[in-house]
Amino acid sequence: MNPQAKLISTMSLLLGTSITISSNHWMTAWIGLEINTLAILPLISKTHHPRAIEASTKYFLTQATASTLLLFASMINAWFSGQWDITQLTHPMSCVLSTIAISIKLGLVPFHFWFPEVLQGSTMTTCLLLTTIMKFPPITLFYLTSPSLNSTLLTLMAITSTALGGWMGLNQTQTRKVLAYSSIAHLGWMTIILNYDPNLTLITFYLYTVTTSAIFLILNTTNTLKLSTVMTTWTKIPSLTTIFMLTLLSLAGLPPLTGFLPKWLIIQELTKQELTSTATAISLLSLLGLFFYLRLAYCATITLPPNFTNYMKQWQTNKPTNPLTTIFTSLSIMLLPLSPMMLTIS
């Protein structure tokens, strides 16, 4: 891809995200989302592979549909209440339509169908952008409109997202699709607490972003696209593969790693709200995701491919390790002791 075109797309991506997260008017938020969509399309289709073109087409159609619904919801709300402020979402029809529109943008169940396919047709770097920075503006809109949204609808979508994200990730052999369904399952955790403590939604999203960024950077360094290829990464960079296992367990939410913090806080808050059955259901459903994280960790660190002939093992990968990988992996593993300070700041 042309460096100038890549620079323009990246800068537009940052501009669109900044406009949406800093706006309090529906039109400026919508403009930011549109800039984001148009900026990421060249990055998805830059390989010129038919799968990449298909992914960019699917992404454009779903995002255009979501943007249309969001604009329609804001116009209905402005028509009946005279307010264009994002926090003044009062009309019931607007609340439902905006929830559907933001869910399509995020990839929540039952609007998840586009997300795994788009990730499968993209490069690892583009997948990293799609699972992290591209989800920040819709999460911000959810955060701003959270008092007006229907808690029953959000809880239902959250439970089904966690269930389907864990269930569909079980039989995947492509690492990008595994992480796509992992993202859907984590979105369920973010959505279920949205009505009761929106700050927890943001904390969960931030920690998920750190952990997922670490995993994508490691996979990009080792050039790992399939589960069978994960088995050969141990001979390339053994230390990085060990860190990869710990990062996966952090994403699964096992203590004493960073990923345990948001799930612990969400379960605690749901219990305070007397939603013990909901907390129990989402905790049990997260065990489905734990299985495929453990399978990835097992393939990466314990399983070695069968070798019937003598050959020279590759102990050094050709790619230099990105400095960001070190930062994100350290944060995704060792951030739990700082949880009291994080809660005080939030």
Image (cartoon, grey):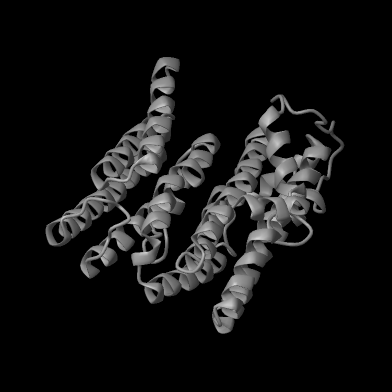
Task: Pinpoint residue 299: horizontal percent, then vertical percent.
Answer: 74, 53
* Residue occupying the far front of the picture: 344
Q: Nearer the viewer, residue 261 or 234?
A: 261
Q: Residue at x 36, y 61 (%)?
A: 111
> In this rendering, is residue 324 above or below 66?
above
> In this rendering, is residue 194 above or below 173?
below
Q: How many labels does the image show?
A: 0
Q: In which quarter of the image is residue 336?
A: bottom right
> Does residue 94 appear left or right of residue 291 in this picture?
left
Image quarter of the N terminus: top left
Res 218 visible:
yes
* Residue occupying the far right of the picture: 310
Q: In which quarter of the image is residue 312?
A: top right
Q: Which residue is drawn at 27% across and 60% down?
A: 89
> Does residue 114 appear left or right of residue 67 in this picture?
right
Res 178 visible:
no
Q: Nearer the viewer, residue 17 or 218?
A: 17
> Does residue 96 appear left or right of residue 15 in this picture?
left
Q: Residue at x 34, y 45 (%)?
A: 59
> Does residue 198 appear left or right of residue 210 in this picture?
left
Task: Pinpoint residue 256: horizontal percent, then vertical percent.
Answer: 79, 58
Task: Pinpoint residue 184: horizontal percent, then vertical percent.
Answer: 50, 59
Q: Quadrant of residue 25?
A: top left
Task: Pinpoint residue 33: horizontal percent, then vertical percent.
Answer: 32, 42
* Residue occupying the far left of the picture: 79
